[in-house]
Image (cartoon, rainbow, N blue to C red):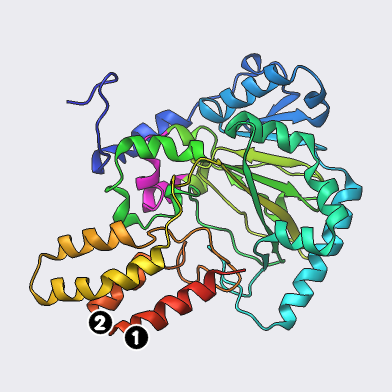
Amino acid sequence: MATSLHPAAWLGEADCDLGEFRACVEQQTDPADYPHAAEVRSNVLVYAAEAVSGDRRALQAEVIRALTDGPGVVVFTGAFSGEVVTKANDAFFAIVEHERGDDRTAGDHFGAPGANDRIWNAAQKLALRDPQTYADYYANDTLALVCQAWLGPRYQVTSQVNTVNPGGAAQVPHRDYHLGFVPVEQLEQYPAHLHRMSPALTLQGAVAHCDMPIDSGPTMLLPFSQRFAGGYLAFHRPEFIDYFARHHVQIPLSTGDAVFFNPALYHGAGANVSRDIRRIANLLQVSSPFGRAMEVLDRTAMVRAVYPALRRMRAAGRPTHEVRNVVVATAEGYAFPTNLDSDPPVGSLAPRSQVDIVIDALHEDLTDEQLESALNDHHDRRMP
């Protein structure tokens, strides 16, 4: 029997109890626990960017508590200057116009392709188009303070600019990268300690690049939901989606405000019901530097070498799980990082991985030459 000292090794149906979820999220943020915060709005902690110039370690400790055991979300008002945001917007809008001219299909995790204006890999594109603005933007010390608090002194910043046009629909509530992108049918295969660890690997942030009143659809948030142990398994379920719809909060933002949250917090972009506001945000996906293997392997070369043996195993009637074990040990099993311009998540949260390519090839009994073509196509889609 699982106890607080010996928690269950796996999560399942019993961990998706709506009553337990309600008990987890239906609490109030106590301002006394967060003395550096300027105020609490709808259970969300709001800090003034000026607080960053004070006792840095004490503020970071407070942010850690807030993101871990507190409401799971903090807002820093005035984090980015209007000047640097305006310059970045000029570059971003130019990038959008350029990419529209390429006639590419810009896949989105939730919105229909083409409904909004999405810039994948916006950090690199800004750096190459306008290096000075990029440098001024990412010199920001509020961003650094929160990233250092959650991920340590070294981290990997990526960003995706999303412009939700008037009439843009709301997202369904979700948790985020990594486990939030795993197909629901696979989630129970990940042990409970990985469900607990996944939120510590990334930080979610968003910088308002325009004023965002409620009717423009700022991010919907459910404070304290990151604390629910079965949250990755549960967020797909209708009763949890309905609860989120009735209990989420939204915080209006001004240009330059920044919101940061635990990636396990239930959240989703709101519907833009305004008449004329193009709601533009720079979505920050900041990752731990530690999610890497010790050695560099040419997994594509390994797949090429082993594929004939895999075909022979399959033809000889070896158990399917044994063949799959070899594929997983050999091929790249994760879809990320990738070039989301040419390898977009159309119809899914993640593109196909190399493991998917090889398993499909075996199922279709592709020849070595046909697999080589599939591997080359997959490689080319992933490259910058």
Which quadrant is home to the C terminus?
Answer: bottom right
Callout 2 crowding tier (Cα within 10 Å): few <14, some 14–19, many ≥20: few
Q: Indicate whether residue 324 is drawn in magenta.
A: no
Asked if 71 appears above or below 179 in the picture, the reply is above
The answer to which of 97 and 78 lies nearer the viewer is: 97
Which quadrant is home to the N terminus?
Answer: top left
Instruction: Tell me where the magenta segment starts and ends, as one range.
Output: 228-243
Q: Label 1: which residue?
A: 369
Query: As drawn, is 247 to the left or to the right of 76?
Result: left
Residue 365, horizontal then vertical, whole percent: 23, 82
**Res 276 visible:** no
Query: As drawn, is 97 to the left or to the right of 292?
Result: right
Q: Distance between the Cα atoms at labels 1 and 2? A: 13 Å
Q: Amino acid at mark 1?
A: Glu
Q: Which residue is at a point 35% across and 63% down the rendered structure image?
A: 331
Give the quadrant of residue 315: bottom left
Please tell me whether mark 2 sits on a helix, a strand or a loop.
Answer: loop
